[in-house]
Each structure stands twice: as C-alpha cells, then as structure tokens.
Image: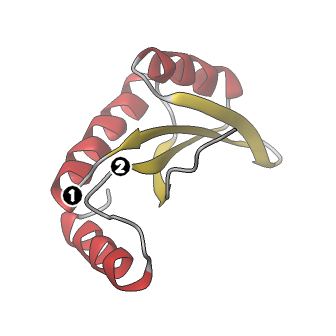
Amino acid sequence: MIPLGQLQEMFGNMRRTTKWNVDGPLLWGYFFTDSAPERLQKAGEFLAGEGYRLVGINENEPGFFVLHVERVETHSAETLHMRNLELYEIADRFDLESYDGMDVGPVVAIN
C-alpha cells in the first residue's frame, strides 16, 4: 500500500516542480495489474460505471497486463489516500494481482 506520508511528499513535490493548480482538478490515472485480461476487463467495466474513463488494457510483457483508468478529480494527499484505499478494495473484489498506483497530469482540453 502507498503510505499517506508518500502522498504528502508527492503533493509537496508537485507544488515545487509544476505550475499546476495542485488544489484544483487534475487528470488522475489509476493502474491495476493481473495475468488475466478478462478480470481486468470486468474491473474496468465496473470502474467505467463509477465514472472512470477506461483508457485501455495493455500487455506490458508476456502474461502481464495493465488496466489504466482515469478521471478528473480534485485531491489532497488525504483524499487521494482514501481513493487509493477504495481502489485496493476493488482490486481485491475482482481478484486482481494488484492495484498498482496512480499518475497525475493537468487537465487538457480536447478539441
């Protein structure tokens, strides 16, 4: 599990090294791994029903698949910690090998 202290450090780094409004909406990507793409697909469909956008399922190496979902959200270290706890539970519910963490970037308008 990703500890709260690590998330607090991440937010501090984002404030120092980016020009993003860290306290506003950002594009958060979340990743899950499993050897069975079918399980990832079911989890992805569930998450899509919860408002996440299914980016895709990719085979990063033979037999190692990664589900990527994303959603525009506003987080603090504490709310991201709570989101991570929810996503660990979803990984358990769908019997996935792992919830593998997140990435973040600015929200970019698509024309």
Residues under numbered marks 1 and 2 in contact, where contact means CB atoms less than 8 Å apart: no
Question: How busy is the neighbourhood of tag 2: few (under 14 within 10 Å), some, or many (20 plus)?
Answer: some
Q: Is residue 52 above or below residue 33?
A: above
| Nearer to me, 20 or 28 | 20
Q: Quadrant of the N terminus?
A: bottom left
**Few, some or many residues within 10 Å of mark 1 (<14, 14–19, 20+):** some
**Residue at the (56%, 17%) spot, across then down:** 42
Q: Amino acid at mark 1?
A: Ser
Compared across the picture, whether 6 is left or right of 58 comes to left
> Residue at left 47%, top 49%?
27
Give percent across and percent down for residue 30: 48, 45
Of badges 1 and 2, nearer the viewer stands 2
In the image, residue 47 sits, relative to residue 17, either above or below, namely above
The residue type indicated by label 2 comes to Pro
- Looking at this view, name the residue that lies furthest to the left: 78
Local secondary structure at mark 2: loop
Label 1, label 2: how many angstroms apart (C-alpha)?
11 Å
Q: What residue is at 19 percent from the left and 49 percent from the top? A: 79
Residue 39 place in picture, x, y as percent: 59, 22
Q: Which mark is residue 33?
A: none
| Direction from residue 83 to residue 44 in the image, left or right | right
Residue pointed to by mark 1: 76
Which one is earlier in the sequence, the residue at label 1 or at label 2?
2
Residue tagged 2: 25
- 63 sits to left or right of 30: right
Looking at the picture, the colour scheme in use is secondary structure
Q: Residue at x 37, y 75 (%)?
A: 14
* 37 horizontally vs 101: left or right: right
Q: Nearer the viewer, residue 24 or 10?
A: 24
